[in-house]
Amino acid sequence: MTEILPDVLDFGLVLVFCGTAASKISARHGAYYANPGNRFWRTLCQVGFTSSLYEPSEFLNLLDLRIGLTDVAKGKAGVDADLKRSDFAPGALNAKMLRFKPQVLAFTSKAAWRAWKNRGAKHSVSWGWQDETLGGTRIYVLPSPSGAARRYWDLDPWLALADDYQTRMRGN
């Protein structure tokens, strides 16, 4: 399988953000969250994960902050509605997380969490911390920063995760 975007993973990460799949714009630019309508990079700066606004092309710089990036579907690009269950590889994501052991795996939408859990759209999941873990990795679900999900946007779960991240960084 050819990956649309490379995983940004390493040992010792505090946090890994996981989306469903790269958008067609991200695939074209070769950078995570490259659609100008996506709030991801602005939100990272606004809530304190980064001290300045990163350009999507600077995504590898997140490793310096002990933050990683990945997607549940690595070989397909597009909007969630265009993806099939067979496009997702939750087992591969699990294997990566068990190998690299980040402290937190944060899904950047409920759809990404559902893709990981192989659940349909009707399956309810709340934003924030989940009861389950993956190895020693805690699981968190965020509102989607995608412009297509604007009506569901809520900054509060992002702020709470940023606070947790800062606490973890001070402790390490």
Image (spheres, rainbow, N blue to C red):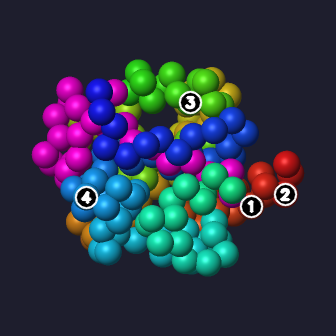
Question: Mark 4 packing: few (<14 Cα in 10 Å), some, or many (20+)?
Answer: few
Q: Residue at (35%, 56%) from the top-left corner?
A: 30
In the image, which is nearer the foreground, mark 3 or mark 4? 4
Residue 142 among those drawn in magenta: no
Q: Is mark 4 on a helix, strand or loop?
A: helix
Question: Which residue position is annotated with label 2?
Answer: 170
Q: Is residue 71 above or below residue 143?
A: above
| Range of magenta residues | 65-89
Pointers 2 and 1 in contact (CB under 8 A)? Answer: yes
Which amino acid type is shown beneath numbered disc 3? Met
Q: Which sits in the foreground, 143 or 91?
A: 91
Q: Is residue 142 above or below residue 48?
A: above
CA gap between label 3 and label 4 equals 27 Å
Question: Which residue position is annotated with label 4?
Answer: 28
Question: Where does the N terminus fall, quadrant-wise?
Answer: top left
Which amino acid type is shown beneath numbered disc 2? Arg
Q: Quadrant of residue 117?
A: top left
CA gap between label 2 and label 4 equals 37 Å
Question: Mark 2 packing: few (<14 Cα in 10 Å), some, or many (20+)?
Answer: few
Which amino acid type is shown beneath numbered disc 4? Arg
Q: Which of marks 1 and 4 is nearer the N terminus?
A: 4
Q: Which sits in the foreground, 105 or 126?
A: 105
Question: Which residue position is annotated with label 3?
Answer: 97
